[in-house]
Every structure is written in structure tokens, then in C-alpha cells.
Amino acid sequence: MKRTLNIETVKKIGEEVLLKGWVGSIRSHGKLIFIDLRDFSGITQVVFTPKMDEKMYSLVSEIKPEYIIEILGEVSERPESMRNAEIPTGLIEIKAKEVKIISKAKTMPFPIDNDGYEINEKNRLEYRYLDLRRDRLKRNLKKRFETISLMRDIVKEKGFVEIETPILSKSTVEGAREFIVPSRNFKGKFYGLAQSPQQYKQLLISAGYEKYFQIARCLRDEDPRGDRQAEFTQLDIEMAFPDSEEDVMSLMEEIYIKVVKEIFPEKHITQIPFPKMTFKEAMEKYNTDKPDMRKNKEDKDELAFYWITDFPMFEWKEEYKRWGACHHPFTLPQETDIDKIKKNPKDILAHQYDLVLNGFEIAGGSLRTHDIETLTACFEVMGHEDEDLKKQFKHYYNAFEFGIPPHGGIASGIDRFFAVALNEESIREVIAFPKTGDNKDLMMASPSNVSKKQLKELGIEISEDEE
Ligand code: ASP
């Protein structure tokens, strides 16, 4: 007999069905036993009546929460007083005829039938596969999937093509610090894990892929800062020949308006079109470049999207005692005079735009420089030597010499968007297998040591005090 999903039982009143799933709560009133059977589609109440024979009774008595079982039974309407309007299967129950235990389960280390916020997060992350059994996380991951599918549909409809780009890439001075991966075949040499598809997507533009997008994984080896993840997901977009910043911004705006309307209809957007504010104005008025512009901060269903524009091109990096790019070095300065760029880096504005939601930056992008002189000047301001750069970005400089159209793009960190839209305080609640704030994977116990043999193959020696 073919399996029926819990959610389908309501259409099968009077029929015999085979259900499979996880045992939720068990309630016994003597020989009258109720089991809530859970599968990915929902929950069904199964009833074992006192009429069952001894063999079945002893099997049912063995069942504990979280066992995986199989039930053959008849779908029947519940007596009026037993109906539960809160769940889609609340009108029916399954009168069990046969039961089979498929897999037993130890006692859970923590409850999984509630929201789980009160449980120590380290415990939850160590046993993430158990934590993920809870309804809240299932809902979050389902919404995440629905949103990403919708985002794909929206941009596909507009002629964008999703193209995967490498994760195993090259270490460059793009901006953030990369994770590096030692090469076994080329000892002493390293790959860099892509901190974003930035360079690849610009090269795709030069190759004539005029409308690129990707649901991209980005990896950054940055110092742990609160609620960040070393590995995160972006909706990454790039287009050739934008008329202005507006072309990129309005696309991202349209995506988020549709996503809210279709996937989070209970939310309301404070203002459409999304208002804009310059970086200068934001700093002067709110002393931050990501002001929380909600009208009512108590309202959990308000989404205040806001564009911040006209960022400075460069910012002083005290740590390195030099200028760095506010966004990244490929951003187009608003100044066309190269001498001015070199002489007055602090006054140069950039064609950069960030999208802020309820006080969080959820997207950032820019128009890009497409002429070599300006790009080189920007790198020079940041203290990079011409020769060194040409070596590091050989692919880039070469591509520019073969022709590249004006282009621009944006990337939206969708983990943060989900956290806000799902009223979660931490992005860890919207990622299936997140790392801790200090980048540990408690479930896999990573990072971990590797064998001496592996190190030797890579030509790496660990100094004593670091072992
Ligand atoms: N690559 C940039 C980032 O990850 C986004 C962009 O400029 O498109 O922030």
C-alpha cells in the first residue's frame, strides 16, 4: 500500500491509509491511547482503542516520543468535542489497525515540541539535526525556500540567467579577508575561497552575459562580530549597460516588494517606492548609515526599507594606516578627474547604494569602473603598487583590455532579510546548519585537527605552540 501524507488524510475520510512518521506526544487513558504522528506535511492524531489485542497493545506500549513508526488505519471524523480547529487535520483521526516500529529514538536532550528559544543555543547547535525537528525551524526553512524560488522566478522572467561561479578561487585584495586553502599539487600555493562572486560576475559581463544572477554562497574569514556568519548566502545580480543606479535599485526593490506581498502577506512596508537618503544625510541625522526608519518600532510586522546612496568612495583604515574602498575597489567613483581622485580621496563620492531594512543593511551594490586608468587610480589611493596589482588582477586587467561595457550590480544578504521577515533575532535561526558567533560548527566539531600525513602532503608544518 502506498503511503499517505498526514495532510492528505482529510480527503480520505472512511478510507484505509498507511501513514509513516515521527511520534510526537503520546497520551494514554488506560488502554485508550492517542499518538500525534508528525511528518513534514503536518500532524495527525492516531487512536488505539481498548479493543486492540494484547500483541498490538504491548507493541504500542513500547512506543516513545520521536520513534519513527508506521500506522495502518482508517480515517474517521473526530467526535465533535474532540475537534481541533487549529490544525488542518483537526477534524479527523486515524483508527489504528496495525502498527510497526521503524526506528527507535533515545530520549531527546531537549524539548523539540516548542519554539526552543529558552534552550541553551550551544546545545541546540550541537544537536542541530534534532533542533531542526521543531516546527519553528521547519517553517523558517520552508519560507526560505519559497522566497528563494520566487526570487529566481522574478529575475528569470526579466531575462536574467543564473550562472554558478567558483568557490575555490584566488586570494586578492577585493575587500574582506578570504579563507585560504592549501594546494596539495602545488605546495606552498593557496586558493582563496570566494568572498563573493564579484570578479567573476564582472568577467561574465565582459563576456556578454548581460543579465547575471546567482543565489551565491560567500565565505569571509572576518573577525567574529555578533550575528555574522563566515559563510552566508546572497542574491547576487549584475547587469550591463544600466542607464543609472536606478536600474539596479528598482530591480531589487521590485523583488522585495513581491516577496513581501506573496510570502509574508502579514507584513506591511512602511513606504513604497522605498525612500532614499544620502550617506551624508544619514550620518548627520542618525549617526549611522543604516538607520531604523520604522514608524512604530513595537510593530513586529512593519518593514521599513530605505536606500542609502552617495557613499564616500574611500574610507580610512586605521588598522592598516591607509585608505580602503568603502564598498569595494571596483566601484565607480562619481569623480571622473583622475588627479582629483588621487589628491582628494576623502572627498570622492561613489556610485554606491545600500538597502537598509529595519536598521540592518540587507543589500549593497554599485556601478562599476570600466576604464583601466580610473581603476588603477583607485587601487593606488588604497596603497597598492601598480605592478603588484597588475599581477594580482591580471585576469581583470586583461579582460578590460578586451573590452567591457558599463555595468553595475548589487548583492543582497538574504539570511538577514529572512531573520527580519521571520521575526528572528539571530540569522542562525534561518540557516539550517549555522556556525556559532566565533565560527565553530559545534555539530561537526569543526574546525578540527588534521592528521600529520595530511599536513605533510600539503607541505605544512604547525609550530608547536599552535598545535
Ligand atoms: N560583491 C558585493 C558584496 O558582496 C556586492 C556588489 O557590489 O554587487 O558586497
Image (cartoon, rainbow, N blue to C red):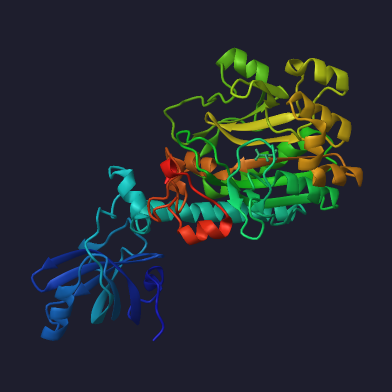
Q: Is residue 441 above or below residue 223?
A: below
Q: Residue at x 80, y 48 (%)?
A: 203
Of the pair 431 and 226, the residue shown nearer to us: 226
Q: Is residue 236 visible?
A: yes
Of the pair 309 and 444, the residue shown nearer to us: 444
Where residue 266 sits: x, y (%)? Answer: 48, 43
Q: Residue at x 82, y 53 (%)?
A: 209
The reply, left or right, for residue 150 in relation to residue 158 is left
Q: Residue at x 56, y 16 (%)?
A: 287
Q: Please identify the quarter of the rendering in which residue 253 is found.
A: top right
The reply, left or right, for residue 71 in relation to residue 225 is left
Quadrant field for ligand 1: top right
Q: Is residue 243 above or below residue 62?
A: above
Q: Residue at x 68, y 31 (%)?
A: 327
Where residue 208 sits: x, y (%)? Answer: 85, 52
Where residue 375 sits: x, y (%)? Answer: 82, 32
Say which quadrant the N terminus sits in. Answer: bottom left
Where residue 443 sits: x, y (%)? Answer: 38, 54
Q: Check the image and name the residue furthest to the top.
A: 284
Q: Is residue 93 above or below residue 451?
A: below
Q: Is residue 368 visible?
A: no
